[in-house]
Image: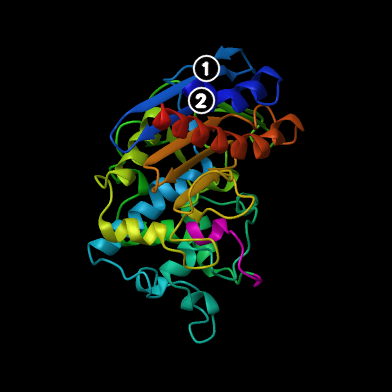
Amino acid sequence: MIEQAFAPAAAAVAAGGIPGATLGVVAADGRRWVTHTGMAALLPEPEALTLDHWFDLASVSKVIATTTMILRLADQGRLDLDRPLTDAIPDLRQYDVANAAERKLTFRDCLAHRSFLPAVEPIYTYDGDPARLRAFVLQREWRHGPPVYSDINFILLGIAIERITGQPLSAWPLGQGLSYGPPPGPAVATELCQWRGRVLKGEVHDENCFAMGGETGHAGLFGTVAGVLDFALGLLDGSGASPAMIEAIRTPFYEHRTCGWERRFDGWSGGAACSGETIGHTGFTGTGLWVDFDRGIAWTLLTNRVHPSRHSEAGKSIFEIRPATGDAVIAACDAQRRA
């Protein structure tokens, strides 16, 4: 089954589209299938990919870590998803408390990207220590626009978690195989970073996350394929989330977005064959996780498509590989059920 599901990614690696890829599939009853191929690094030294390698999960951090933390705090009564962020961050735009629209944003608005905040800003170019950059994020008068997928939303959510818990995000228990960097094992290389002047390996790829200390609400989490599958199984069998949390991540709130996740829509990353009760999320480095609740399966495709550069045409093949993999996973699982 796994060979059929892995065929699109394996072909891309063989053609030089991406250096390496790992695919993991897990069923609600705990059965799992995992395979991999290619290289963990091409530069500065070649290194073969193994199942023990840690991937920079990039924006998959938003759902595995930040969304889970926010929903768990809501479960505990420590925040209300429909209350303003200022419940946790009273100093948000503190010099314009009467007029600042940011002060009216709710936790749910940010989780579902239903805010007016920009998609991303080069926060790392504003020189300063992590605490100063957090203050910059809180006090900046952001340009307003239509709702878009926004890193700023999740940077604010990460700061809210830090304020509520009084601890960094890395203090949250994440489970084996998930960790804020540097990871406790061999790491997959990402980009030859022009700003940092080196190939990134075991340090977060996202520039803003790196400048803000390496653990923020929008990025910073590393994971092995086993760690990501363990998290997904917790959603499928209910062991990793309460019924209220599962409802929040499955229920549309704004267009195709739920609390933190995307639901299946035409042309999305998870392919066309999955059920309408499928949620997913991708990461810029070439990672992704999808959960089909109707079929009781989840799959993660982990690649290093930005290695050695995000600007290579070959790395853009990920946008075709992801939906093709999703369709192949569903076809293989359905065939196995019929057998």
| Mark 2: few/some/many CA within 10 Å (<14, 14-19, 20+) | many
Residue 315, position in %: x, y? Answer: 69, 32
Q: Residue at x 55, y 60 (%)?
A: 152
Is residue 283 toward the left or the right of residue 239 in the image?
Answer: right
Q: According to the image, label 2 marks what residue?
A: 22
Residue 236, position in %: x, y? Answer: 33, 44
Magenta-drawn segment: 143-154
Q: Residue at x 37, y 40 (%)?
A: 232
Q: Main secondary structure of the magenta part?
A: loop
Residue 308, position in %: x, y? Answer: 67, 26
Q: Residue at x 26, y 66 (%)?
A: 78
Relative height, residue 248 to residue 301 (above, below): below
Secondary structure category for the residue under label 2: strand
In the rendered image, which quarter is residue 30 located in? top left
Question: Is label 2 in contact with label 1 (beta carbons under 8 Å)?
Answer: yes
Q: Amino acid at mark 1?
A: Leu
Residue that extends furthest to the bottom in the rendered view of this protein? 98
Instruction: Look at the image and tell me whether residue 181 can be seen.
Output: no
Secondary structure category for the residue under label 1: loop
Q: According to the image, label 1 marks what residue?
A: 49
Is residue 68 toward the left or the right of residue 242 in the image?
Answer: right
Is residue 145 in the magenta section? Answer: yes
Instruction: Look at the image and tell me whether residue 111 can be seen.
Output: yes
| Mark 1: few/some/many CA within 10 Å (<14, 14-19, 20+) | many
Q: Quadrant of the C terminus?
A: top left
Q: Which mark is residue 90?
A: none
Relative height, residue 248 to residue 25 (above, below): below
